[in-house]
Image (tube, rainbow, N blue to C red):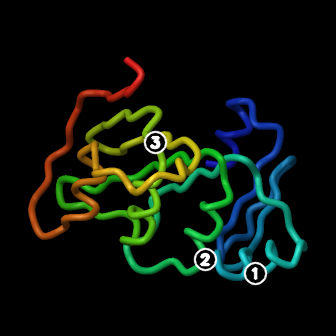
Amino acid sequence: MTDALLELGASSVLGIEPKTNKLGPNIVWYSQSFQEFANDLAQGLVCLPKMALVSWPLWNPLPGLVTLLEQVETVLYLGKNTDGTVCGPEDFWLHMLEREVLEHVPDRRNVLTVYGPVTGKPPREPEIQEERAALDSHRWWETEVASYSPKG
């Protein structure tokens, strides 16, 4: 994924992956947990980019992830919470409800959603199927195949 981001025009990419040995030009890998990265960030030891790509996050708790995302302007989510698949812990999805959905492109294999900055308003109601399915995993949710763009 880091290589793809560079090919799409990113000048550099920061990867946070606890178990990695990947190397590449303009890619900085941080081989620790989200919590350890958040601790280093709080101490000024590392810098945080303006945009975060969260790709297929684990369903179980990911300490430090929301702490990092609270400081990022834009979040790109890639994963899937429908058709029997689950991505992202509850605190991640509750945080996403504090952001505006800028673009949403569902697919049967992956869902791509772009979230804008934290609005500073009370959390909104889930407005896309991915969010509804993530926060109500006790029922079967099917993939919506229509794209969503709140600005038309």
Q: Amino acid at mark 3?
A: Glu
The residue lying at 14 percent from left, 47 percent from top is 142
22 shown above or below 26: below
Q: How many marks?
A: 3
Residue designated by label 2: 64
Label 1: which residue?
39
Which sits in the foreground, 15 or 122? 122
Q: Tag 2: Cα neighbours inside 10 Å, few (<14), some, or many (≥20)?
A: some
Residue shown at 36%/45% (left/top)?
A: 110
> Marks 2 and 1, Cα distance to the nearest angstrom?
8 Å
The reply, left or right, for residue 121 in relation to residue 69 is left
**Which label's residue is closer to the chain start, 2 or 1?**
1
**Contact (Cβ within 8 Å) of mark 3 with mark 2:** no
| Image location of residue 67, percent across then percent down | 62, 71
Q: Closer to the N terminus: mark 1 or mark 3? A: 1
Picture disc at residue 100: 3
Residue 34: image quadrant is bottom right
Nearest the camera: 138 or 73? Answer: 73
User: Which residue is found at the position 90% from the left and 73% from the top?
Assistant: 45
